[in-house]
Amino acid sequence: MTVSYTLKVANARFGGFSKLLFRWKGSIYKLLYKEFLVFITLYAILSVTYRFFLCDEQKELFEKVSLYCNRSTDLIPISFVLGFYVTLIVNRWWGQYTSIPLPDQLMCVVSSSVHGGDERGRILRRTLIRYANLSSVLILRSVSTRVLKRFPTMDHVVEAGFMTRDELKKFDSLHSDFNKYWIPCVWFTNLAAQARRDGRVRDDIALRLLIDELNKYRAKCSMLFHYDWISIPLVYTQVVTIAVYSFFAFCLIGRQFLDPRQGYKGHDIDMYVPIFTLLQFFFYSGWLKAGSEKLRVFIVQSVMSFWRQRKVSPYLQQSQALAKEQFSLPEA
């Protein structure tokens, strides 16, 4: 879960960033503490068994296995595999955010290119923006369960004002096995072409600007659709997960503190608690967990958690309101 914390560190002061380490909501501690406790418990069980329940021959065998496991951990390229995987996941996560279609730019182009202060001009601008918003609602319904709960059927989309009953009939008459978010974009281009013929759009350059901005908007809708459709290859996720879990499975035995009297290299002192192994588990497993959470939660779900509390997105409300009027410059 993405938690905003920038306000907490907005002012430069002593220990400002250090306070973030003690936050629980959305923290790595909340995400990892169960696995961390399991790892500590298993390590403690093996340590107690080695120290108090094994005979001398069994201890000798355990020590040889421990040394072998410790050497074998160097053969697992965990830093490379995990680093590349998390980088891929974070780039994909940010790409999802930048692909969310926001109507601001298109709204400004419609307001500046489609002229007319009469009722026909207001309806025309409002309809163009409504078609664009309808396209985004259709794509968000397919990638976000929270938006789908807000608009479970197309009738709910009609009731919200994004579509008329006649438009719904035309929409349903066009059969497609995939999301039909592109249909409102076609309606938009047809209406823009009609506005050019009627003189509402004054020249072809303005029409071209309008269509280009719509294409950018439609491309973002398409990217969201493909992000939801095409996932990170399962085999790569499995490789990374197995690499991390197997690494720490070997660490449970290989990082045990052995009897210093045996003279094994690197076992000159018995510390009981493997501080640096626990830190390594915290860093690597936390890295994997952070990547897994971003892979599991489609970012649109997080963004829509705020939007679902309202009837429609604040961006959609704003675009509909501003498209009604053409605002003139203030007097000097």
Image: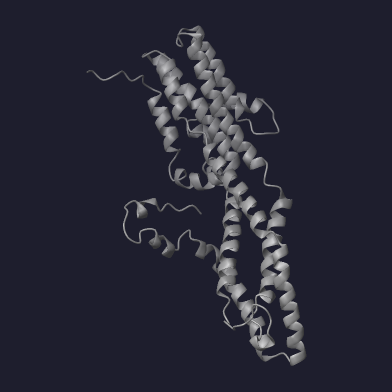
**Residue 188 placed where, x, y %?**
54, 20
**Residue 24 placed where, x, y %?**
45, 63
In this view, the residue in front, 286 or 134, is 286
In this view, the residue in front, 307 or 99, is 99
In this view, the residue in front, 149 or 276, is 276
In the image, what residue occupies the spot 69% across and 75% down? 254
Q: Quadrant of residue 276?
A: bottom right
Q: Is residue 183 above or below residue 19?
A: above
Q: Is residue 233 above or below residue 55?
A: above
In the image, what residue occupies the spot 67% across and 25% down? 174
How are the colours assigned in the image?
Answer: one colour
Q: Quadrant of residue 325?
A: top left
* Quadrant location of the C terminus in the rendered image: top left
Instruction: Please give left or right for residue 105 compared with residue 148 in the image.
Output: left
Q: Is residue 21 above or below residue 237?
A: below
**Residue 290 placed where, x, y %?**
56, 56
Q: How many marks?
A: 0
Q: Farthest left residue?
A: 332
Q: Quadrant of residue 260?
A: bottom right
Q: Is residue 254 above or below residue 310?
A: below
In the image, what residue occupies the spot 45% across and 10% down? 200
**Residue 40 placed where, x, y %?**
59, 75
In the image, what residue occupies the spot 67% across and 47% down? 232
In this view, the residue in front, 272 or 267, is 267
